[in-house]
Image (cartoon, grey):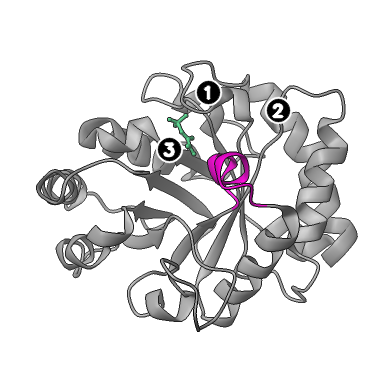
């Protein structure tokens, strides 16, 4: 798995034709750009995954899902199992704060989803996100430890730190604040569970109101290995620009 990532989360946006136009524009924009160190991942809505994946077929752009079921098979109406996605998706976003909030996903369910993703060979992008609370450290550590309780080897794991108040608001956290949370809370918690090397090797992304103008400030931080983008991923020029900035910022790392 590559160490640096640009991940686009299209959420519940786009019609089929809009999704295909967006995917084609991203492909055209990035086709001639060689970025050996940066993995680009697009996470379309479920119904468009197959069609979008066909557009990216012979490119280095990978497909991710925005969610999976915590169950593996059976009578779970409306759910999508990791095994159903594993031929198409190499990544899946798990525990996004929108799902923690509106679908009442708890740490235990999220932990089961991480297990099902890894068992299906899909790399989980585990989102950890706190509201403005006076126990940021405690909340994030708990989200990490409970999501990973049954994961012995974190080599497929990616973490995305996304403060709830920064998502979709146009008000990003400050790059130094993000680096501090990664260095003093997220990475130490991974180190406590898995030891130094696996903790150092786990890519940690930032997400929350990133756009092409502010992206570089975050990417310049050594602690941050890439971005998870919502709104910016719906604009092909903006998304491609951020992917290129990632390559530029990380090229000599
Ligand atoms: C997100 O939803 O994961 C996200 C980062 O959204 P936005 O970039 O729109 O803040």
Q: Quadrant of residue 182?
A: top right
Mark 1 or 2 closer to N-term? 2
For the residues labelled 3 and 1, the Cα–Cα distance comes to 15 Å
Mark 2 or 3 closer to N-term? 2
Q: Magenta residues?
A: 95-105
Does residue 98 belong to the magenta stretch? Answer: yes
Q: Residues within 10 Å of mark 1 (few under 14, many from 20)?
A: few
Q: Which residue is mark 1?
A: 217
Q: Which mark is residue 14?
A: none
> Any atom of ligand 1 within 8 Å of the CB at mark 2?
no
From the viewer's perspective, is 214 left or right of 18?
A: right
Does residue 74 belong to the magenta stretch? Answer: no
Instruction: Judge depth for marks 3 and 1 and give the one in front.
Output: 3
Q: Which residue is mark 2?
A: 131
- The answer to whether the residue labelled 1 contacts the one labelled 2, judged by CB atoms less than 8 Å apart, is no
Q: Secondary structure at mark 3?
A: strand
> Any atom of ligand 1 within 8 Å of the CB at mark 3?
yes
> Any atom of ligand 1 within 8 Å of the CB at mark 1?
no
Locate residue 53, reporting x and y percent. 23, 65
- The answer to whether the residue labelled 2 contacts the one labelled 3, judged by CB atoms less than 8 Å apart, is no
Q: Nearer the viewer, residue 251 or 46?
A: 46
Locate residue 11, reporting x and y percent. 37, 44
Mark 3 or 1 closer to N-term? 1
Q: Which residue is mark 3?
A: 229
Q: Quadrant of residue 233?
A: top left
Q: Residue at x 76, y 30 (%)?
A: 180
Q: Nearer the viewer, residue 5 or 123?
A: 123
From the viewer's perspective, is 62 left or right of 176?
A: left
């Amino acid at each position: 798995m590559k160490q640096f990532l640009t991940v686009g989360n299209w959420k519940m946006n786009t019609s089929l034709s809009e999704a295909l136009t967006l995917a084609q524009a991203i492909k055209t924009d990035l086709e001639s750009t060689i970025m050996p160190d940066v993995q680009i991942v697009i996470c379309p809505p479920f119904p468009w995954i197959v069609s979008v994946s066909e557009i990216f077929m012979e490119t280095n752009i990978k497909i991710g899902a925005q969610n999976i079921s915590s169950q593996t098979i059976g009578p779970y109406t409306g759910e999508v199992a990791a095994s159903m996605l594993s031929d198409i998706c190499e990544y899946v976003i798990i525990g996004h704060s929108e799902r923690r909030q509106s679908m009442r996903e708890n740490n235990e369910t999220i932990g089961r989803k991480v297990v099902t993703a890894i068992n299906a060979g899909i790399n989980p992008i585990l989102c950890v996100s706190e509201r403005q609370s006076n126990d940021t450290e405690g909340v994030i550590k708990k989200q990490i430890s409970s999501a990973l309780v049954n994961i012995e080897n974190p080599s497929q794991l990616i973490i995305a730190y996304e403060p709830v108040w920064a998502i979709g608001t146009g008000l990003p956290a400050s790059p130094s604040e993000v680096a501090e949370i990664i260095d003093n809370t997220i990475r130490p918690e991974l180190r406590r569970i898995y030891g130094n090397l696996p903790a150092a090797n786990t890519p940690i992304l930032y997400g929350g109101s990133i756009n092409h103008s502010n992206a570089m400030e975050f990417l310049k931080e050594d602690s941050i290995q890439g971005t998870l983008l919502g709104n910016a991923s719906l604009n092909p020029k903006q998304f491609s620009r951020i992917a290129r900035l990632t390559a530029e910022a990380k090229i000599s790392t």
